Image (tube, rainbow, N blue to C red):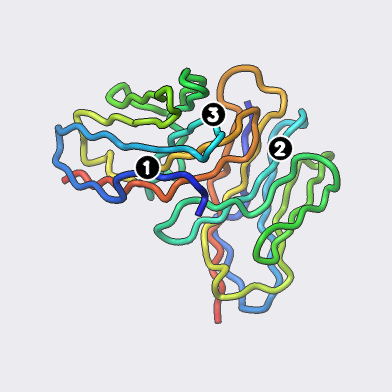
Amino acid sequence: DSGVTQTPKHLITATGQRVTLRCSPRSGDLSVYWYQQSLDQGLQFLIQYYNGEERAKGNILERFSAQQFPDLHSELNLSSLELGDSALYFCASSRGRGREQYFGPGTRLTVT
Amino acid sequence: AQSVTQLDSQVPVFEEAPVELRCNYSSSVSVYLFWYVQYPNQGLQLLLKYLSGSTLVKGINGFEAEFNKSQTSFHLRKPSVHISDTAEYFCAVSDKDFVTGNQFYFGTGTSLTVIP
C-alpha cells in the first residue's frame, strides 16, 4: 500500500459526459501528479501540482483540468469525453524536489 | 529536458536465469534515478532508487541497479528471476536542481516475461 488513494476504482460513462477523479496523496506529500496510461500511448504525464499551485503541464488536453485543494487532495476533471479517453488514470504524490513518486492504484475509465 | 530510453520493449527469460533491463538517460546533470514495477491491473510500485552515495543500489524482491554516470545508464539486474517477476518495468529520472516545470521523466517500459 503506497498511501495514495484514488476514487473511484472503475468508472463507466458515455461519450460527451463529464467525470471527476479524486486523489488523496500520502501524508506530508505536497506534490501531486496525474498520469494517463493506455495501451497505445503508454504512460503519459498530464499535470503536476505543488501545494495547491500548478507546477507543470504535460500532454493534457484542453477538455481536461485539475486542481489541488488546501487539504492537498486533488481532482482531475475530464469533460466532453471521447472513446479515446478510455484509459487508466493514475495519481502519484511526492515530497517534491525531484524525489520518488508514490502511485495510487488508479482509476479505470471506460467511455462507451 | 531529460529523455529516458529503455532499449528493450520486451524481455523473455527463463525462470531462475539472470536478467538485465537497460535504461539510459540523456543528460549528465545531477539526477535522481528510479525503477518502478507494474503488475497487471495495478499501479506503479517503487522498486529502488538512487539519490546519492554508492552507485550500486539494492531494491525489493532481489533486484539491484547500478548508476553509471559516464555512460548515463541505470541498468536493472536480478541474478535469478521467478515467475512472479513477470511485469512491466519502468525506469525514471528526475533533475535534482529543477526550478520550474516537470522534472520527472519515465521511460516507455520493458515487459519482462518469465518462462517456466
Residue nearest the viewer, comparing A105 with B41: A105
Question: Which secondary structure, mark 2?
Answer: strand
Q: CA distance from mark 2 to mark 3?
A: 18 Å
Q: Nearer the viewer, mark 1 or mark 3?
A: 3
Chain ID of residue with mark 3? A
Question: Which secondary structure, mark 1?
Answer: strand
Q: Nearer the viewer, mark 2 or mark 3?
A: 3
Disc number for residue B115: none
Q: Residue at x 31, y 50 (%)?
A: A9
Disc number for residue A30: 3
Chain ID of residue with mark 2? B
Q: CA distance from mark 1 to mark 2?
A: 24 Å
Could you classify mark 1 by the number of other residues whose Cα lies within 10 Å: few (under 14), some (14-19), or many (20 or more)?
many
Q: CA distance from mark 1 to mark 3?
A: 19 Å
The amino acid type found where label 3 is placed reads Leu
Q: Quadrant of residue A96?
A: top right
Could you classify mark 2 by the number of other residues whose Cα lies within 10 Å: few (under 14), some (14-19), or many (20 or more)?
many
Query: Considering only order in the chain, which callout, 3 or 1, is on the residue closer to the N terminus?
Result: 3
- Horizontally, residue B106 falls left or right of residue B61, namely left
Quadrant where the C terminus of chain B is found in the figure: bottom right
* Cβ–Cβ under 8 Å for marks 1 and 2: no
The amino acid type found where label 2 is placed reads Tyr
Q: Which residue is mark 1?
A: A89
Q: Residue at x 74, y 70 (%)?
A: B79
Chain ID of residue with mark 1? A
Residue nearest the viewer, comparing B107 with B31: B31
Residue most extreme to the bottom? B116
* Cβ–Cβ under 8 Å for marks 1 and 3: no
Q: Which residue is mark 2?
A: B32
Could you classify mark 3 by the number of other residues whose Cα lies within 10 Å: few (under 14), some (14-19), or many (20 or more)?
some
